[in-house]
């Protein structure tokens, strides 16, 4: 069967096409100018960012995080050890709070080299736990730190294993914000490299044991408190 278009669309005139493409052309030119302004001085000085990325600030503190974990105010670490997830070494902590005596698992994976990038950390945790994911949402929290408001967005969902149900919170703690997506870090880091700087990152995964009959919203208050405490402590003690 031959199908033909009985109502062919008119071909746009060159004038119309140029009007459509001009805004895109302007955006490309502006981006090129910004890249050149940032990159050319570094190229002249022999510090070309894409050849050798700048150093990571506080790299030694991040490396120590895997060995020692994180001391959280208002929380006590029952146990801390290095665990292997997806071939990478994470810090694994069991913590209890002054007002919460049921152990919560805190998993931390810091950046370890200048070329490390966040990628499949959430897949690695999910694969190790072999859980089934339930309802997922994004939890947004404004963290107060040193007089500044730090925006943090985190994955927030229910997860079910054969023997346990969790409310799970996951995000990448950065030096000025928190985000659940690697892409956000990538663009922030690229802009920072144009200034000879870097954006360090730590992957955070919190596993809060809950009753399988509870709604996800019932754990939102505790999850918010943990986000505030963990993000603020990483910014103070690690970055």
Image (cartoon, grey):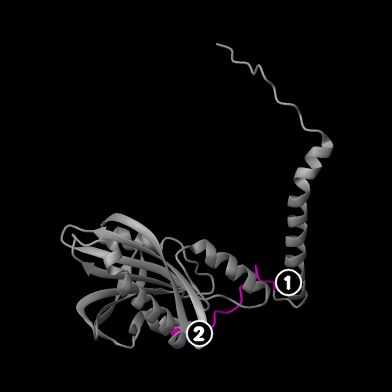
Nearer to us in this view, 228 or 119:
228
Q: Position of residue 143 (x, y in %)?
A: 45, 79
**Residue at far left of view:** 163
| Residue drawn at (77%, 70%) of the image | 37
Q: Is residue 174 visible?
A: no
Nearer to us in this view, 95 or 225:
225
Question: In the rendered view, does 204 fall on the left or right side of 94?
Answer: right
Question: In the rendered view, does 41 fall on the left or right side of 88?
Answer: right
Q: Residues within 10 Å of mark 1 (few under 14, many from 20)?
A: some
Q: CA distance from mark 2 to mark 1?
A: 24 Å
| Residue drawn at (53%, 67%) of the image | 185
Q: Secondary structure under badge 1? A: helix
Give above or below for 171 relative to 235: above
Q: Position of residue 120 (x, y in %)?
A: 42, 60
**Residue at far top of view:** 1
59 in the magenta segment: yes
| Residue drawn at (32%, 61%) of the image | 157
Give above or below for 97 relative to 4: below
Residue 99: quarter of image:
bottom left
Quadrant in which the N terminus appears: top right
Q: Which residue is mark 2?
A: 58
161 in the magenta segment: no
Q: Which residues are magenta?
A: 48-61
Q: Secondary structure under badge 2? A: loop
Residue 86: quarter of image:
bottom left
Q: Position of residue 81 (x, y in %)?
A: 28, 79
Q: Which residue is mark 1?
A: 38
Sequence-earlier tag: 2 or 1: 1
Q: Position of residue 213 (x, y in %)?
A: 18, 60
Question: In the rendered view, does 105 fall on the left or right side of 201?
Answer: left
């Amino acid at each position: 069967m031959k199908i033909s278009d009985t109502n062919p669309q008119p071909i746009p005139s060159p004038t119309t096409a140029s009007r459509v493409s001009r805004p895109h052309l302007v955006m490309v030119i502006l981006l090129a100018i910004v890249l050149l302004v940032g990159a050319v001085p570094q190229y002249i000085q022999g510090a070309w960012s894409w050849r050798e990325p700048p150093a990571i600030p506080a790299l030694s503190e991040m490396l120590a995080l895997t060995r020692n974990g994180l001391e959280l105010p208002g929380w006590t670490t029952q146990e801390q050890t290095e665990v292997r997830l997806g071939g990478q070494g994470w810090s694994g902590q069991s913590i209890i709070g002054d007002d919460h005596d049921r152990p919560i698992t805190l998993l931390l994976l810091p950046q370890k080299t200048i070329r490390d990038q966040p990628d499949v950390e959430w897949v690695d945790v999910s694969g190790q736990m072999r859980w089934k994911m339930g309802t997922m949402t994004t939890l947004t929290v404004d963290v107060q730190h040193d007089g500044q408001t730090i925006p943090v967005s985190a994955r927030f969902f229910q997860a079910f294993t054969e023997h346990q149900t969790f409310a799970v919170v996951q995000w990448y703690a950065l030096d000025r914000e928190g985000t659940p997506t690697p892409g956000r870090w990538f663009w922030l880091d690229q802009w920072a490299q144009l200034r000879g700087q870097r954006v360090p990152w730590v992957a955070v995964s919190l596993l809060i044991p809950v009753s399988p009959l509870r709604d996800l919203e019932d754990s939102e208050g505790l999850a918010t408190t943990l986000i505030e405490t963990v993000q603020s402590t990483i910014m103070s003690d690690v970055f």
